[in-house]
Amino acid sequence: MLLNAETQYQIEQFFYAEAALLDAHRHEEWLDLFTDDCRYWMPVRQATLAKQSENEFSKPDEIAFFNEDKTSLGYRVKKIESPYAWGESPRPRTRHMCSNIRVLSVDGDEMTTECAFVFYRTQVEADVDWFVGRREDVLRRVGDSFKIVKRSLFLDQTIIYAKNMNQFF
Amino acid sequence: MASVAKCAATSFRDRVNTQEGLVDRAIFSEDEVYRVELDKIFARAWLFMCHASQLPEKGDFFQSFMGEERVIVTRSRSGEFEVLLNACRHRGALVCRANAGNAPSFTCAYHGWTYDLSGNLIGVPGLTDLYEKSLDRDAWGLRKAAQVSSYRGFIFATLDPEAPPLDEFLGEAGKAMIDKLADYGDVEVVPGIIRHRLKANWKIGVENDQDYYHVGISHASLLDAYGMSRSEVHTRYWQNNEGPSVMGEYGHTTDLMTGHYHATIFPHMSMLTDLLQVVIVRHPKGPREMEMWYFTFVDKNASAEDRKMAIDRNNSRLGPTGMVEQDDGENWEFCTIGANSHAMRDVPFNYQMGLGAGTTGDSGEVGYPLYTGPRTTEEYARWRLKCWAEWMDADSWPDLQAHHSKPGAK
């Protein structure tokens, strides 16, 4: 895959379109952006001594906030779309943002990208949640767009202050 | 209107009317109640700290809380577990900032007082020049929990020197609840302690563990996602659900249902031990706030496949992202808002489900009395609140030992 300004532009537009789907609550279309063999992972973070930072994040075979494949992501989409998803009514107002987008490596028709994400959510009356972190995506070129093969989400906070994390990142 | 005698209340027993199933809502929100809880429950009870598997090496430490007190659980040079208050004896600053790790000692970043793994003060900058060696280092070590003990690797501590041994506090019933998790094998905690802050009273969270009334309602979207029928769930929980449960001494409770075994060691340690393998602790953070910590347990000798399945089951259901627990936190926050209502301050909460149903037998072959009756019931909550009031009214451990309810006693 050729890495140039055009590719960077395509990646950015892909991520912005993805964010727009989430903020419009179009979850099924969002799910279609993932490959059938995808992995969606968010480890648990803890505060460690500076010299012991290798233990900061849980490992892939340990506890995680998310450790999903396409099937389990699908169940989560069905749940959030259910008329009995009490937390979705009124709809949370969300804004997914990503910046500092870089391509870290290219391997055939796949590439690994990194970005900083900011996810703002406000709901009910005055509930406000901010989720900020680093995101790594493995994207696969499919036609003139991409699919997400692997998404890894590294939250900056160690304690979750939001009443839940029902939405997708 | 039915009411609890809040205004005239001279005791906490008056605010928890378990005969009629009426509970003063303010016990879930009031600043003064919470202040008493810190003294009479969290500074008195044996509290779960962590599991021995988290501290395999000398120098390993894990930060926890006793009520709102920050403590460091350490594995000392002699291999003992110590529970140290994380506050420098000089000006009270933290001496440890990490959740967990390995360290030879703890140094205060303010003036450099340094403590060893057992809390001994081993370093004071300027001891000769500024204190002229007159400071008695032996007298100024970190404060420690009054007692530390463990049962099958589950480490507990209490701030009260008068507390009876852990064995007596847990009783046969409490120990059986821990056995249910420990019996999975040579269990260890899987790395990744989830910490989740909610604007909810800690008791409301604890109550939910044995609330089988809410499952088909709160979690209806989960059932929907998996194509399960809500009426089937209601049938399972609401009908034909008679059986044994445990309403244990000092407020320890559990159901004995296959697929559940949701147990609570009073005050705030919950264990979901069938299907799930987890300890959940609800640290109080004020009258209307708490922090839930999740410890997942697996058998060290489990096959890779079994280990993965156990971890996946917990991951998919628990914590703020859990397909089950996504729905719970908001309810508890809303309940806490309701508990704090000014206009309804004299209107009690209703705890009347299953009132008068069921019977408690004698200590039989299991070694502790079983309650037999409906298992979708508020009996668990009534019993625990009754015990809670006894803890709150007691002046001391000896007073509590002399004046607390025994299961089945008339």
Image (cartoon, rainbow, N blue to C red):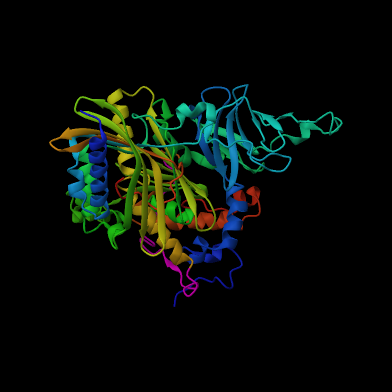
Quadrant hosting residue B140: top right
Q: Residue at x 33, y 48 (%)?
A: A97
Q: Is residue B182 left or right of residue B286?
A: left
Q: Residue at x 54, y 22 (%)?
A: B57
Residue B275 shows up from this direction: no
Asked if residue B344 lies in the magenta stretch, the reply is: yes
Magenta segment, prevailing SS (helix, strand or loop)? loop
Q: Residue at x 43, y 28 (%)?
A: B188
Residue situated furthest left in the rendering: A143
Q: Position of residue B68 (x, y in %)?
A: 58, 48
Residue situated furthest bottom in the rendering: B1
Magenta residues? Answer: B341-365
* Nearest to the observer: residue B208 or residue B73: B73
Q: Is residue B342 left or right of residue B83?
A: left
Q: Position of residue B290 (x, y in %)?
A: 49, 51
Q: Position of residue B14 (x, y in %)?
A: 55, 66
Q: Is residue A43 left or right of residue B167?
A: left
Q: Position of residue B18 (x, y in %)?
A: 46, 63
As drawn, A7 above or below A13: above
- Quadrant of the image containing the C terminus of chain A: top left
Asked if residue B384 lies in the magenta stretch, the reply is: no
- Quadrant of the image containing the N terminus of chain A: top left
